[in-house]
């Protein structure tokens, strides 16, 4: 808990990081030349307005790869998983993946936008379930808390991020 409180204090009033390393070791095989598994930490893209390290609503954040520590230097290299094995991401590959621009600068990769909402239906009391397609191509069933019996119109979801549609009220319907 002390680490979380320290991290929260450090982030107060600061710009959100571009990515976050999840401190949960995953054992994965390195490229074809290695037979042993190595420790990799999941790396997620991070929203510009997300500053809390205790906000675990990570469902729609993009996976950028795995951070693998290089030797005892304390430095990490971003790897991607291909065919069940980890491979380092080169500068050219980072551009191809949309992680870096051509100048080598890291790009913010937060939650994708909702590009299509096919249907909205009641889920359980107080919730609606929306059948959506995200800008990264994923299909998502997104739960929205509703304050009344009224369900959001599918058009209300378009252009928003999943975190932006967590709550629907009659007064927000005009947004």
Image: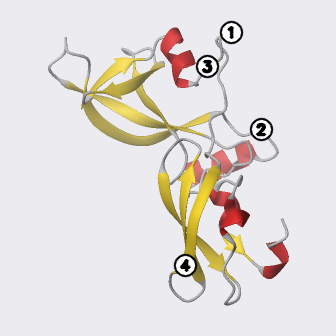
Q: Nearer the viewer, residue 93 or 131?
A: 131
Pointer 3 residue: 100
Image vertical order of residue 13 relative to residue 126, above or below = above
Distance of label 1 from label 2 (alpha carbons): 22 Å
> Dot 3: what SS?
loop
Distance of label 1 from label 4 (alpha carbons): 45 Å
Q: Which mark is residue 121?
A: 4
Pointer 1 residue: 103
Badge nearest the viewer, 3 or 4:
4
Image vertical order of residue 149 relative to residue 23, above or below = below
Distance of label 2 from label 4 (alpha carbons): 37 Å
Mark 3 residue crowding within 10 angstroms, few (<14) / some (14–19) / many (20+): some
Mark 1 residue crowding within 10 angstroms, few (<14) / some (14–19) / many (20+): few
Image quadrant in which the C terminus is located: bottom right
Task: Pick whichever of labels 2 and 4 is earlier in the sequence.
Answer: 2
Query: Mark 3 and mark 1 in contact (Cβ < 8 Å)?
Result: yes
**Image point (73%, 65%), residue name:** 156
Q: Report x, y in % for residue 151.
A: 66, 80
**Which corner quadrant of the image does residue 34 belong to?**
top left
Task: Pick whichever of labels 3 and 4 is earlier in the sequence.
Answer: 3
**Image point (64%, 12%), residue name:** 104
Badge nearest the viewer, 3 or 2:
3
Mark 2 residue crowding within 10 angstroms, few (<14) / some (14–19) / many (20+): few
Distance of label 3 from label 4 (alpha carbons): 39 Å
Image quadrant in which the N terminus is located: bottom right
Task: Pick whichever of labels 3 and 2 is earlier in the sequence.
Answer: 2
Q: Nearer the viewer, residue 132 or 21?
A: 132
Pointer 2 residue: 15
């Amino acid at each position: 808990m002390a680490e979380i409180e320290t991290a929260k204090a450090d982030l107060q009033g600061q710009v959100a990081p571009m990515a976050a390393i999840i401190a949960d070791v995953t054992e994965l095989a390195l490229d074809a030349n290695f037979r042993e598994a190595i420790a990799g930490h999941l790396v997620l893209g991070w929203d510009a307005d997300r500053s809390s390290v205790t906000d675990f609503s990570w469902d729609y954040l993009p996976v950028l790869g795995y951070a693998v520590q290089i030797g005892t230097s304390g430095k990490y290299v971003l790897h991607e998983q291909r065919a069940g094995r980890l491979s380092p991401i080169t500068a050219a590959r980072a551009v191809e993946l949309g992680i870096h621009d051509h100048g080598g600068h890291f790009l913010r990769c937060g939650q994708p936008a909702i590009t299509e909402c096919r249907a909205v239906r009641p889920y359980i009391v107080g919730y609606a379930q929306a059948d959506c397609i995200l800008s990264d191509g994923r299909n998502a069933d997104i739960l929205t808390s509703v304050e009344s019996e009224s369900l959001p119109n599918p058009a209300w979801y378009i252009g928003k991020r999943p975190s932006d549609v967590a709550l629907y009220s009659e007064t927000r319907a005009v947004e």
